[in-house]
Amino acid sequence: MACVGRGRLSAAEVEPPPPEGRHVNLAGNENAFGPSPAAVQAIFKAAALSSRYPFREEYVLKQMLAQREGVAVENIVLGNGCDEILALAAAAFLAKDAELVAAQPTYFQITDYAGKLGAKVTWVPFTKTMHHDLPAMAAAVVERTKLVYVCNPDNPSGTVRPAAEVESFCREVAPRAPVFLDEVYLELGEDFAAQTQVPLVRAGLPVIIGRSFSKMHGLAGHRISYAVTTPKLADALSRMQMSSVNYIGVAAARAALLDREFPGWSRRKIAAGREKFAGLLGELGLKFTPSHGNFIFHRTGRPIAEYQAQMKAKGFLVGWPHAPVVGFEDWCRTSIGTDAEMTAHAAAMREVMAGRG
Ligand SMILES: Cc1ncc(COP(=O)(O)O)c(C=O)c1O
């Protein structure tokens, strides 16, 4: 745990070695550096009050988020993780025989959920450089298309489309079908303010921006997230929601938003880990995509299941639940762990690649 910026913790406390007998999980895109000490303090404090429903606290969090995003409270929907926001969007817009347009490969939750609802997914393959092919996605929108999903930065590839391209895509497509812009990894970039498409929401365009406290803030276990969207779409999402978010998660998120130090520190630690891992992949001659997330998508030179088993035998969980994707059978997504975890992971990977795994 922890933010070294405060200088209160020893190096051993900051980078604990992996617990013995447990696998190091580099398969979940969790933030290994979180949560911030301020969030932890708030979590303990909130625990004593958690016999209460969080309705008032939720509203305060929504106000804070609205202020942060430059929108009104009516533009914010809280969710149990961005996964719930994705499920709400699917439930609101995708009925049997409706169509969802999505890139291939991308984050699988909404595409899976669409299938459960009886909707059809129109997959649009990546460009050769492994980016969303936005012109092809726009061309794939037909009358039956009721939702379009763009994950920017994408998971698993980590690639990002520049703000200007995403904006013109949304201006063209959103009047025909709402666009869900999954920006859960965008905050990990230095130029977040210039890249986010929240200005489109302010302009009244039917887009839903998905955000999460799981990534930069390291609060994945609290399942707290939100959407920024138009009041009309916020209402459509909220109608599909049965429960609220949880009391302790709300307290943690509020503390996280007030923490001026942790986000920058967290971002720098993840970027440094990513750079080091990219160096290793270069050394091993393994192709990878330029990632803007807390993970890297890279080749392994063998079927992903074989690579996962080899790395598991060495104590590391890598990949993601839907691997492999057609066309990416030997590609793995590896999340960035703590410095100690990544050093140990590098040694394991070198052995596996040298045939000693
Ligand atoms: C692209 C993307 N969207 C949404 C989520 C879900 O985030 P949350 O933890 O807020 O449910 C993830 C989680 O890994 C993700 O990668």
Image: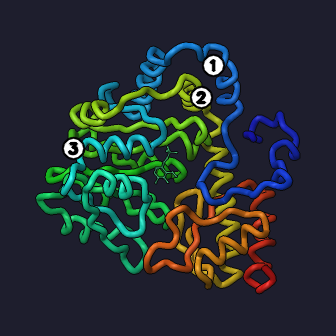
The type of residue carrying mark 3 is Leu
Can residue 311 be spotted in the picture? Answer: yes
The label number, if any, that marks residue 205 in the structure image? 3
Q: Which residue is painted at 54% across and 13% down in the image?
A: 52
Please report contact status of discs 2 and 1: CB closer than 8 Å, yes or no.
yes
Q: How many marks?
A: 3
The label number, if any, that marks residue 252 in the structure image? 2
Q: Which residue is painted at 81% across and 49% down in the image?
A: 15
- Which x, y percent locates residue 205? 21, 44
Q: Quadrant of residue 206?
A: top left
Please state if 35 lies on the left or on the right of 133 as rendered. right
- Which x, y percent locates residue 224? 51, 35
Marks 3/2: CA–CA distance: 31 Å
Please state if 242 lies on the left or on the right of 97 as rendered. right
Task: Report which residue position mark 1 lands on.
Answer: 46
Name above or below for residue 343 compared with residue 61.
Answer: below
Mark 1 or mark 3: whose residue is earlier in sequence: 1
Local packing at callout 3 (Cα closer than 10 Å; few below 14, some 14-19, many 20+) is some
Can residue 191 be spotted in the picture? Answer: no
